[in-house]
Image (cartoon, helix red, strand yellow):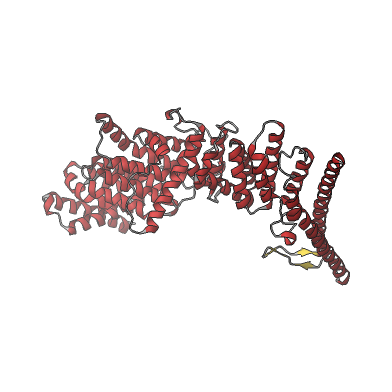
Amino acid sequence: MPEEQGQTIMAVDELQAIIQRCQILEEADFKGEDFNLFQVAGQKCLEDGYAAQLLEVIQNEKNKVIIKNMGWNLISPLVRCIFMYKQEDDKREHCLKILDHLAQLCNPKELFLGLLEQIEQTSGEQVCQTVMLLLQPLQTVLLKLQNKKAYSVGLSLAMIMNQLTPLPVPYTKQQIQEDKLGLCQCCNAVVEFAKPFVNEVVKNMEKSSEYNDMELKEELLKFCMKSLKYPLLTAQLEQLEGIEEHPFRHFATEIIDILWDIRELIPLVFLHRKGKSPHWENQEFADIEQKNSADSLACLSYLMFVQHFGIDCFPVVFSPSYLLQCNMTHIEVLLKRTEESMLSKGLDLFESCLLRMEDNSLLHQYLEFRDFINVPQDLVKVMTLCPIEHLRKKSLNILQLFIDKFDAEGKYTLFRCLLKTSNHAGVEGYIIKNIKDQIHLSLTACDNIWFTGHHLISLLDLLLLLPEGAETDLLQNSDRIMASLNLLRYLILKDCESDNQTGVWTTLPKIEQNFLKPLHVGLNMSKAHYEAEIKNKKENRREAHSSNTVCSVTVSGEKMPAMTTEMQLQVLHSALFTFDLIESVLARVEELIEVKMKAVIDENS
């Protein structure tokens, strides 16, 4: 014990000796050796638990010049010691006071670099703790800087955001409440850190309408753009029951407020302004910059038009169709993502824009914009490929909403496009049902040239055929085939040959040649094939020792989970049932054609 006390006293004595030696020197005479000795002695005092003695040295007015030049060297051991002690420990309090004094006394440039180095070196679970610990001294130092202030603020914010970005964003209510890594708390602390610099920009803009010092404003804009991409693009931003102040909603409000204060909110929303993007010679870097900007702008639109952050600042002069046009680029960005948090934001933004519009009000000319063709195609991919059921269902509802908003020509053009691009029988069947509804409206409610006459005949040529003739996979295309047969049955029942409003009677020979006859042949071939398969399976089952023999089945080149013979027989019988269903509707259609034709002959004779 006496030996330990002796070592500690020696560390304090060494520090005092260095201090006394440096007190008699001029500032310009400090040597590298002095800096090293001060750092080693100060670190030893901290590590041995004698922060109180070190604090006294730092508080001593006589040592002001020494601390100004050398104090920044203590940042690294100081941070380590602060995390080593428990919250209520007096030694931790002494260390925190030392940190405050260093922020006030040290050379701002040197301390700035020392603080940034600490933030850069932290990782894992200590990132948020370190950032929150150093934000106040970093802010104090930055406010003192005269030269390159905007650059230093930008560097600080960029470094902090780069350190936070790898951390997982709490998504569920429980994760947000726990805030295990402290990210929720840290993000809001970073906004508070930025506020004095926002106020400085605002004050300067108020002084002069031609505010020329754009550097600090640009750095704050970059910070907001980064914040929109992370954590806000990933975060769950719906109101959650039991959470009085949702940390990410609060953070989003603050970011929107900053953008409004620096007069960038409306330009970003409507002019898609991206700030001064650096010129990248490397195209890969340029692409990354563009993608990051697109993600940020998409998140900003979601915040404004879905969550209504900053909506009070919003000019109420734009038509719903113009707002949809402005947002289609952002919707496309979000719908191409696979993460639930981003995909759901894209669907919500699309739905919000569509709900502002009257049915049949969206002009067909909008389909000349690339986004208006791409977005429904992306929506179809979500409907058919997304593993999350509620998002698949929602995307189907939104597709219908999108269809409903177009005028007749727009619906017609959109249907043709989706039929050619969806490559999915279920989607094609859904579109055909929509076409049938539009034909019904044209025949009963309002005369519409796009779903009658030669326009409809052109559309029927796309619908009433088998893509590969009799060789078409009827099971895979069953949704489309059933929808086409139901449409044909409706047309024959509703449209008399004498009226022929739809043109179906004109094109009937082609329909019989391209659709009905090949369908008959295809059904006969398919039923014979599946009946033979069932017979083989039953024979194999009798020969096998057990009816639970397991086989593997390959569908579209993908190996499916192993199936017993009984399971395979169920699948084969289900296919036969589908063929029987198609055959019964086909028979009904042909019967109706025959009855109608006979009636016409009888009438003419």
Does residue 90 appear in this view?
no
Foreground of the two, 152 or 181 = 152
Foreground of the two, 323 or 481 = 481
Q: Is residue 63 above or below residue 48?
A: above
Which image quarter: residue 344? Answer: top right
Residue 41: x percent and y percent? Answer: 25, 55
Residue 275: x percent and y percent? Answer: 34, 44
Image quadrant in which the N terminus is located: bottom left
At x 75%, y 57%, the residue is 474
The residue positioned farthest toward the right in the image shown = 542
Q: Is residue 270 above or below residue 533?
A: above
Image quadrant in which the C terminus is located: top right
**In the picture provided, is 70 more to the left or to the right than 279?**
left
Which image quarter: residue 202? Answer: top left
**In the picture provided, is 205 more to the left or to the right than 288?**
left
**In the picture provided, is 441 more to the left or to the right than 159?**
right
At x 57%, y 49%, the residue is 377
Residue 204: x percent and y percent? Answer: 26, 33
Does residue 581 appear in this view?
yes
At x 51%, y 34%, the residue is 321
Residue 175: x percent and y percent? Answer: 54, 44
Foreground of the two, 488 or 242 = 488
The residue positioned farthest toward the front in the image shown = 605
Q: Is residue 358 above or below residue 11?
A: above
Image label count: 0
